[in-house]
Image (cartoon, helix red, strand yellow):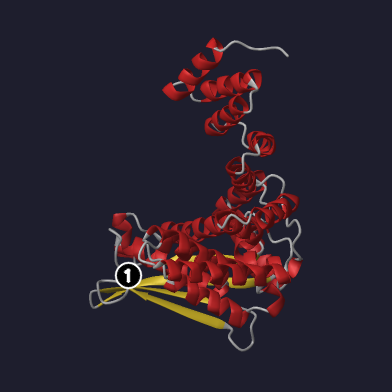
Amino acid sequence: MLDFGIFTLPAIAAALVFVTALFIGEDIVIEKVDVPTFREWSGYSSTVATRQLSDELREMSVAAASELHAINIDEGGVEKGINAFEDYFEVGLLINGARNMLGLIKYYINGEITEADGVTRLYVRVYTKDEDNPVKLIIVTGSGKGNVTGKGNEIDALLHEGAVQILEFINPYIIALYHRRMELEQKQFDFPKTHAAIQRFLVNQPTEQHFLAYGMLGRVHMLRAENDTSLTPEQREAAYGDAERHLQAALLQQPEFLYPLINLGMIRAAKKDYVAADGYFARAVRADPNYLATRTAWGDMLVEQGLLDDAIIQYAAAVEISPHDARLHARLAALYEKAGKPVEAREEAEAALRLDPISEANARKVRELEEKPVIVH
């Protein structure tokens, strides 16, 4: 199950309504995507297309959930939810029929793929309980006459774009996370689709839930400042200023929102404002003691200041959080060695070598520490 941690239920409903529904089987039902019979020879039956649309929605939702680490997701619970979702075609119709009669389903989805005049189209209908907008019709066009390009198989592309537009309608915040990842990979540092989705979220969601959008906007401006090499120094400083302004806005609404705390800590650390950065990192650890990025970012800042003992504390915590990461053990070994603690350094170096036995760097470090005499004070 999902552990909602510090957030209120209304905020979660706004941020992860689709993720929750997809994993736990609440709120949303995908009935069927009909496919022309002649398509079956190429492997596209209605069952396959329905499953593929479900998979597209699930993959985007899992990606969104993984970026919202401040909302802790129990991987075992998620895996159980996915397994349950895979059983949809076995028992889903019976269960969902009963739930629909009881009025428990918020979104009911069906669709069909059509072929006419050489043009392939996907029609998706999203039925809701909104009296003013009971049915959302989504139309995606293929065969070069629409906006579906870039995939080898046209139906794959139609279903992918259909999933994007379904998420756009149900919750623009989730699709904004997806757009952010895609635009960052494509080096589109102005993030046009991300900004558009966030603006829709701000328009359509209650004010008390806007901290999610402000946090994402802050991160987007920060990513631009860090990655856009075309920026002048003045433009980069302005981007960091925009980032801090939005991150602070998120914290005004939700003071223990993990991501703004980490990002503000990193920005302040980069500006050598160590006191402020230390405060943000400490708050981030209180919000989630087991978030790895906080520990390593804080530890690196402490190393930069020459505070090795404090840095060791953070990297020791990082190793506890991720004990099978050879790089973390190697990093902790180097800190112990620099701090004059050869016994601890050797233990961590040996742990790194066990986890990555083909690493010459790890093997060399173990040999170096074995050759060093241990001085007992």
For the question of whether residue 294 can be seen, the reply is yes
Residue drawn at point x = 59 percent, y = 28 percent: 338
Quadrant of image for the C terminus: top right
Left or right of 204 in this view: 118: left
x then y, percent, for residue 114: 34, 73
Residue sitting nearer the eye, 310 or 292: 310
Left or right of 258 in this view: 51: left
Query: Vertical placement of 294 versus 94: above or below?
Result: above
x then y, percent, for residue 80: 64, 46
Tag 1: amino acid: Val
The crowding category of the residue bearing disc 1, from other C-alpha atoms within 10 Å (few below 14, some 14 to 19, many at least 20), is many
Among the 4 quarters of the image, the one containing residue 91? bottom right
Query: Vertical placement of 364 versus 323: above or below?
Result: above
For the question of whether residue 2 can be seen, the reply is no
Residue drawn at point x = 48 percent, y = 23 percent: 362
Residue drawn at point x = 74 percent, y = 65 percent: 255
x then y, percent, for residue 284: 70, 53
Residue sitting nearer the eye, 277 or 43: 277
Q: How many marks?
A: 1
Helix, strand or loop status at disc 1:
loop
Query: Vertical placement of 185 versus 210: above or below?
Result: above
Circle 1 sits on which residue? Answer: 148
